[in-house]
Image: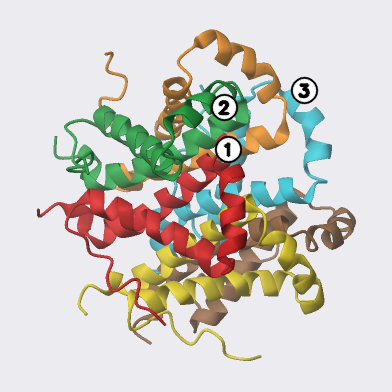
Chain colours: A brown, B yellow, C red, D green, E orange, F cyan
Amino acid sequence: MDTWLPTLITETPQKGYELALLLSRKAVGMIQPDENIRKMLRPGYSSDADSLTMASQVVAINFQIVAAANNYWIEK
Amino acid sequence: MDTWLPTLITETPQKGYELALLLSRKAVGMIQPDENIRKMLRPGYSSDADSLTMASQVVAINFQIVAAANNYWIEK
Amino acid sequence: MDTWLPTLITETPQKGYELALLLSRKAVGMIQPDENIRKMLRPGYSSDADSLTMASQVVAINFQIVAAANNYWIEK
Amino acid sequence: MDTWLPTLITETPQKGYELALLLSRKAVGMIQPDENIRKMLRPGYSSDADSLTMASQVVAINFQIVAAANNYWIEK
Amino acid sequence: MDTWLPTLITETPQKGYELALLLSRKAVGMIQPDENIRKMLRPGYSSDADSLTMASQVVAINFQIVAAANNYWIEK
Amino acid sequence: MDTWLPTLITETPQKGYELALLLSRKAVGMIQPDENIRKMLRPGYSSDADSLTMASQVVAINFQIVAAANNYWIEK
């Protein structure tokens, strides 16, 4: 299996936020591994406001993890 | 790419709250990058009470992160 | 802009709970700044049990923040 | 105003759990202060499985706060 | 009242997970004390995928509490 | 009963993420033990975008636990 998550440490908060987005997408990919189905779902999904809000919530929860792992980038 | 999140540190709790709002909006923008679609969604979305509650929940989760990063602004 | 959140510190847990409620309402106000629309939404919203539960969840998440900021009012 | 939350400290985990339930109910009461409306909502609400699950989630979030405040009752 | 939660400490992570499940069910029982209504709800509820996901989320939140209480069973 | 969760410690963040996925699935299995019903639910569930988002949120919450247990794999 590919290594897609070698570390939770990022250089900046912004890169941490991007990692949080990656984590969120990865879960979807692990639950529904069929890329064709996922592609089919995306247009409807990303045009519905509540769906977007729900997705942004998952990003926020993952960002909690990444931010804590990086001690909120305070030393930097 | 633009730097939009150089730090999680803010001067005051209120500025931290505004950053939490920005984080929430940013996720939506990263998931749905098409600004036209987002603008189209906004009126309906922000006139539905449950949608507003869901969005305010994402802000709350992001505020948890920002508040922890700032040690709850206790020293200040 | 008005200062509406000078501190997360409150004298008692109960005042902290009220602050959590204020934080929850503030997010809604920042996302939907039009007070007339918000007033229109309120009756329906606060008469639907699931909407109330969702709103109480946002209060709970905000109370986590306020309670942690106050070290759970343990010294008092 | 009545004091209904003098402290987050409880003697036992079980009493802490009951306090979490009280906190959850209190938010609902503060958002919808009209007891008659709340009573009207209760039968439908507590007979719907998803509504019950959502409500139990709010209890869980509040229990996180109470448990942390009591240091998980470890010393006792 | 019966003592059903004497402690959050468990011997193993797995027993902690079972306690998280118990906590989730207990909230439902405290909100809807009528066992007959709960039994009536169960078949429909546990055959709906989203309902199951929602319920598993409550278990996850409760497991956060139990895991933290046990310091993640690290010493063992 | 089988031991399926001997520890929360994993070698890498990625293995921790997989454990979070296992935890999420385990809760569903404990709430609905009938494998036939679960298999029947899966196709519909994993083809609905909001269902996938909800499921990915449970994974995120479980990953918070696993990541904290492993101190975010910082020493490694």
Say whether residue D59 is visible.
Answer: yes
**Mark pair 2, 1: CA separation:** 7 Å
Q: Tag 3: residue type?
A: Asn
Contact flag, marks 2 and 1 (Cβ < 8 Å): yes
Tell me the subunit letter for badge 2. Answer: D
Residue occupying the point 53% across, 45% down: C54
Q: Is residue F20 left or right of residue F68?
A: right
Q: Tag 2: residue type?
A: Tyr
Which quarter of the figure has residue B58?
bottom right
Q: Is residue A31 left or right of residue A18?
A: right
Where residue E50 sits: x, y (%)?
69, 37
Which quarter of the figure has residue C6?
bottom left
**Mark pair 3, 2: CA separation:** 30 Å
Q: Which residue is mark 3?
A: F36
Residue occupying the point 63% across, 68% down: A21
Mark whose residue sits in front, 3 or 1: 1
Q: Which residue is mark 2?
A: D45
Tell me the subunit letter for badge 1. Answer: C
Q: Which residue is mark 1?
A: C50
Position of A37 relative to E21 (above/below): below
Residue occupying the point 25% across, 25% down: E6
The extreme left residue here reads C76
